[in-house]
Amino acid sequence: MHREERTNQILVITSHQGLVGIIQEAVQGSLEITHAADEKEGLEKARKNFPNLIVLGYIDPPGTAFQLHRKLREGWITKNIPLLLVDADTSDQAHRVLSLEEGLQIEADDYITLSGVDTQASATRLARPIAALMDRVQTRIQQNANVLREAILDPEVFCITWEQIPGRGAFEMQQEELIENARRAAKKGTVHAVSVTDNPGGNPAISTEILCTEVRKLGIEPLVHLAFRDKNRNECESVLYGLAGLGVRNVLMLTGDYPSDGGFKGRSKPVFDLDAVHGLQMLDMMNAGMDHETMGRKVKLAPTDFFAGSAVSPFKATESELLCQYYKLDKKIRAGAKFVIPQLGYDARKMHEIMLWLRMHGHVNVPVLANIYILPLGAARLMNSNGIPGAVVSDKLLATIAEEAKDKDKGRSARIMRAAKMYAMAKGMGYAGAHIGGHGISYETLEEIVQRGDEMAPRWRDLVPEFDFPQPDGFYFFEKDPDTGLNTERSAPRKEKGAKPPIYQFARVAHATMFNPSSVVFKSLRPMVKMIDNSHRMKSAFEFCEHLAKVAMFGCQNCGDCALFDVAFLCPMSQCPKSQRNGPCGGSYLGWCEVNPEKKCVWVRAYQRLKSHGAEGEIVEDIVPPPNWELMGTASWLNFYMGRDHSARKLGIAPPETKAGSKKAAQSQAGQGAKA
Amino acid sequence: MQISEAIRGGRFCVTCELTPPKGTSIQGFLNAADMVRNYADAILVTDNQRAVMRAAPLILCQVLKSRNIEPVMEICIRDHNRLALQSQLLGAAIAGVENVLVVAGHDVLVGDHIDAKPVNDMSCSSLVQAAVMLNQGKDLAGHNLEGSPRFSIGIEAIAEKGLKPDQVADLREKVAQGAQYIITQPVYEPETMAAFVESVSDLNVPILVSHIMLRSASMARFMNSNFPGVNVPDYLIRELEGLSREEVPAASVQLSIDLLRRMKPLCQGMHLMPGGWERYVPRIVDGVA
């Protein structure tokens, strides 16, 4: 909901009581009236309450109203609130709202003089300009409406988003084309939003956030991609506030491809401070009005109105990868994802699978935009060799495209037709829209796809056999429906074997005894741990030992906020190059890591370990918070016992009672630990 | 250079009005002057305009003169008696001022010193007469002067459609006394300007139409309610309605240009009153030319 929609309020700022009565009379209870009697109160209420309309009358002493009018017009928060200046009685020179000189410089939306003291006549005179300004507020709300959100949420509308690549550089043809595309899209009206990717492929590119504010100025809704590869949590929050302030409201939260080796003097440092689930949680808090503490005071920020979506990568060949993808999607939806755009792929059964999965898992109302990429031969070759993480082109599809490329038009009409057919299938399968992308695609091409897709949509089922491109032995969540070529509602048998390496068995036993708050061992060890924790020397020794042991067993990186319990005793900080704590990124291939293809994805291993005792479903249960960097470099076992890390909080382990008051002391200890 | 001579030379004369500072800092005034100097034949300096106390125009005219900008000094009968008015004029002449505009001034009640005593010792027409006498080397009492000014004297007029006979008579009287040109109040309807020009055609003096750029719809409505004789038609106000702060200037500049172009054939010059929007003067002057 946009800020302006939240209130139906007029703020009357005047020290002339009579005016308040006149306005009450004029609006006759249709609007809520708040009164402020002086400049300070007026400014404060204008900023806090965000009224729909401000009526400014005479304020003592003369000249105050003009100054206030200027502050309201120039203020970051108040500049767009309609402002009506009212001279209650022009015959009373000493109490004019403005002097002649001031009057020539006003920038209010309207100005009106009231004839005299007769309240009724004044109210009648005021009613019209107030109504006109309130109409304008309504129009502004409509103009300001988030077209993308409305299109995605409206079941009657098939939403079209158009993906653009920002490109590296500031004055390059890619940016020229992007802006030109956005301008044309804004003019023509088929497209609901233009999306701009965030450093695609892990390469540096011009900032999507800045381009998106430009796109918005052109009159079309932008969709900002936000990849957590390059920004830590503070930077994400900061960028999001900037976007909110400039009226950019749609965000697609993504893990992001790993940084490429094309950065300035080498590969960039991967950040991955948050994952997409955390990002969505943060955004949800921002939308609710974030609470935080500053200088010992509790502050609630004004709410933002972001509309956020996320991605899922269903084109996975193995059971463990696919299940983990859906587990993570479940978390994303719980964390506040309002729509989903899957990774691109050309498999009708997978397209159908995700819709069915959502329906079967209680997410009927989560809209999905089909990812339609207009696929030329070069890109198909690249994807076929796993050159774009998560994007799957099977050998059979590649062969088809290679054949088409021999046509006179080098396969152009065939690939556009393929996109249109995918569009038609998406529409038929109940997708909320299509996210269309492709290198160098003109607006006309996009319209052609939409038009042909719309034409073909009624007979979409006939198209399904043309998109039969499974991965060899690829796993599907549901069993195949031989009649439709799609899926039945029956889950496919999950035959992938569990794994129970000795270290896992050892870790589980250790966990059950030592890290179980209800166990005898835990209870008896706690006083000793407290003693160690209070002694600097013993603590250092302990930290050293723990570090050695955990490096040897788990490759520990000393984050101090241990997530071993959450990932079947695999360390996501050291074993996952993207530090994913809530499920895999979309980049794995046949179970192998996107970044280190010689290693298994940590989530595949975790799935197999948990499956060995039928507990793989646990992955979906808890949203694991991002590591608290305050604990970096401290002993996580101590943190657990002393109730400082997220696992302890989850299990309800309170910090031990101290004289100074438990919570504060624990916090300061954690702080010291971080400094040590 | 005298305004009346410039007009006689046959070109469309542009004057621009600047307000002296309230205080002693003149940097803002000078910056504004620099913005418009190449686009105006002369800069008019106002005299406690709208009864708001400000620095004396005489000294600012001298400053302009020293920077090779042609000044027009406004002189208002409200704040001086006949001694002060004449001595101001002589002082101005010594500073090199050749153009004066004689005005009546607003009631002190609309200004920022509502308890001030309005002087009004002379009428505008008698001040015009006094200035002409100074030009001829005599003061009001008939005494001879050592050296005399050569003022070109202007007067103001409300340009209304239905100009009343006594208003015409008043202008006729001032012209008879020696006024050489007329600057109107701001006019936003070319028809009104045409009617005004028609009704004073027999006076045979050049007319400059003055113009205040519209800052916002509310500012236009404010003028309609508070400036007698000013009428901004609704269609102009609507052009500005609903525009954001950033969008207004461009729209306003365009409105000004369109309007002034339509009035240009009716008069001999224009008098711009930018009031803080000096930066848009070049675009308007170029647009009207």
Image (cartoon, coloured by chain):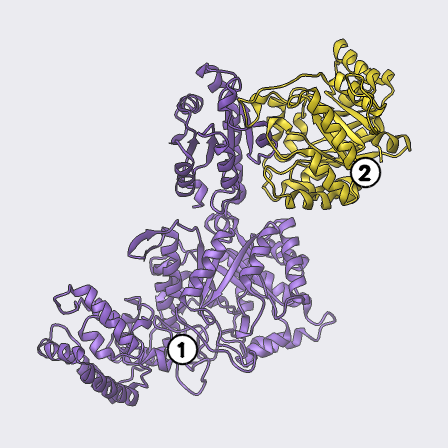
Chain colours: A purple, B yellow
Q: Quadrant of residue A646?
A: bottom left
- Asked whether, in this view, residue A555 is left or right of residue A514, the answer is right
Q: Residues within 10 Å of mark 1 (few under 14, many from 20)?
A: many
Q: Quadrant of residue B236?
A: top right
Q: Position of residue B170 (x, y in %)?
A: 76, 13
Residue situated in front as seen by the camera: A399 or B92: B92
At a point 50% along the width and 22% down the height, the residue shown is A94
| Image height of A299 relative to B56, above or below | below
Position of B236 relative to A639 (above/below): above
Give the image location of residue A207, x and y in percent.
55, 65
Q: Quadrant of the C terminus of chain A?
A: bottom left
List the residue tagged with mark 2.
B41
Q: Nearer the viewer, residue B283 or A570?
A: B283
| Residue type, label 1 | Thr
Q: Percent x, y for residue A316?
A: 44, 74
What SS does tag 1 mark?
loop
The residue that label 1 is drawn on is A318
Does residue A129 lie above or below A446 as drawn? above
Q: Is residue B218 left or right of residue B8?
A: left
Q: Chain of mark 1?
A: A
